[in-house]
Image: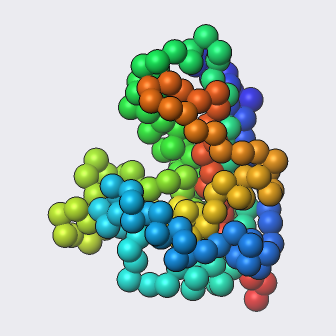
Amino acid sequence: MEETKLYTCTTLERTVPLKEFRETLVDVPLFSGYCRDCPNWGRYWSCPPFSFDPMAIWERYASLRLYARKLVFRKDRLFPGERRAFEEKELPKIKEAMARALLAMEAEVPGSLALFPGKCEWCSVCARIEGQPCRTPDRMRYSIEALGGDCGGALERYLGESLQWSEGRRLPEQIILLGGLLLPKEE
Ligand code: SF4
């Protein structure tokens, strides 16, 4: 467990069979419908709409190693205004650390594919906004939700956790960032 002045951070991991995950927690039309309402729709190469069918990715692998970081905020830091500072300064660093950890895991398992916690954030402005190809496709990865996966359902079903929502400028008591590693079928 890692502890800072603002939160404690725990890493959660569990490997699940992909057939079961696909059949119960993947619904591409439903989740791309939610993505349509997001300002990132069509503005990042890691976000929908895609020129391929996301089901082709889910069907290519055997299992999914869920990899989450759970941040529980200190109760004395839940005042209004703290949320914006956290989202601007801390959150990008935590997501980048997770992305780097997932790419390192992927490098250790031939044929695997990392899934990032949220959109790809390697560039300050994604090339897709400028109508250009991805600048570093070798390290761009999709997220579970961008491919039509249910992150909230996965947290509840496999990690015994639930998403929490906060209102306005106040931090929730905790947040959980979820990524993963798709593991290959045996040859
Ligand atoms: S690496 Fe850069 S250009 Fe490619 S998807 Fe990520 S932010 Fe966009």
Q: Residue at x 35, y 57 (%)?
A: 40
Residue 35 drawn at (x, y percent): 44, 63
Identify the residue at the far left of this view. 130
Q: Nearer the viewer, residue 42 or 90?
A: 42
Colour setup of the view: rainbow
Identify the residue at the far top of this view. 76
Residue 63 drawn at (x, y percent): 75, 72
The quarter of the image holding the C terminus is bottom right
| Residue 98 sits above or below residue 90 on the image | below
Q: Is residue 44 visible?
A: no
Q: Residue at x 52, y 15 (%)?
A: 79
Residue 155 drawn at (x, y percent): 73, 52
Instruction: Report the side of 136 relative to 11 (left or right).
Output: left
| Residue 54 sits above or below residue 98 on the image | below
Q: Residue at x 69, y 69 (%)?
A: 25
Q: Is residue 70 visible?
A: yes
Q: How many marks?
A: 0
The quarter of the image holding the N terminus is top right
Identify the residue at the far bottom of this view. 187
Q: Quadrant of residue 153?
A: bottom right
Residue 39 drawn at (x, y percent): 33, 55
